[in-house]
Image (tube, helix red, strand yellow):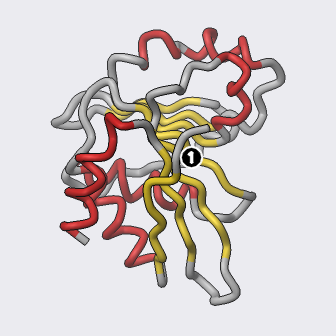
Amino acid sequence: MTPIISEKRLANEEATKSFAVALGALLQPGDQVALEGSLGAGKTTFSRHLICALSGEEVDVPSPTFTLVQTYETPKGDVWHFDLYRLEEPTEIWELGFEEALSHISLIEWSSNIASLALLDNALTLTFHLTDVEGARVVTLQGNHSWWQRLEALDASL
């Protein structure tokens, strides 16, 4: 099991945006960010803010629920935004261009749907949890040792 590195409390959407901007500054091509949480927990909202931060401008970021994947060109390279909620079999990920995405930044909503393939061992996993306060979220960050130093920088920037 991947150790829990930290937990962030996001009071509102503005806090979610600040978190996305700070994390985006640390991402590099080849990084995978796995996004988990119940429906409505904030995965797509976070992804929109992160993609806009990486793009350096406001970009239309529709949920890829029906297309399963969207790509965006950014100054840091392409960002592949997957939503695997509707994936019927884990191996369908290959039909979506996942192998090519590995050399780019990947955001993978519902990443647990491909967990059996063990493709995300080096991913940073963000699990979004709803709270009793409207608009607030708690995010648990998990990753292997390769993320520790960058997440310390993230803590310092927030």
Residue 155 is situated, as x and y percent measured from the top left of the image, at: 27, 65
The residue located at (39%, 76%) in the rendering is: 15
Which quadrant does the C terminus fall into? bottom left
Q: Is residue 25 left or right of residue 39?
A: left
Q: Quadrant of residue 83?
A: top right
Secondary structure state at the residue bearing disc 1: strand
State the count of labels: 1
Residue 72 is situated, as x and y percent measured from the top left of the image, at: 35, 34
Q: Is residue 56 left or right of residue 36?
A: left
Residue closest to the far bottom: 133
Question: Which amino acid, by three-letter code, is at mark 1?
Answer: Leu
Q: Quadrant of residue 74?
A: top left
Residue 56 is situated, as x and y percent measured from the top left of the image, at: 19, 52
Residue closest to the eye, 104 or 127? 127
Which quadrant does the N terminus fall into? top right
Whether residue 56 is situated above or below residue 158 in the rendered picture: above
The residue located at (19%, 67%) in the rendering is: 157
The residue located at (69%, 27%) in the rendering is: 115
Whether residue 120 is situated above or below residue 130 in the rendered picture: above
Rate crowding at label 1 as few (under 14), some (14 to 19) or many (20 or more) other CA atoms within 10 Å.
many
Residue closest to the eye, 40 or 151? 151
Q: Is residue 92 left or right of residue 158?
A: right
The residue located at (71%, 14%) in the rendering is: 92
Residue closest to the eye, 22 or 85? 22
Q: Which residue is mark 1?
A: 35
Whether residue 65 is situated above or below residue 42 in the rendered picture: above
Residue closest to the eye, 42 or 149? 149
Residue 81 is situated, as x and y percent measured from the top left of the image, at: 49, 36
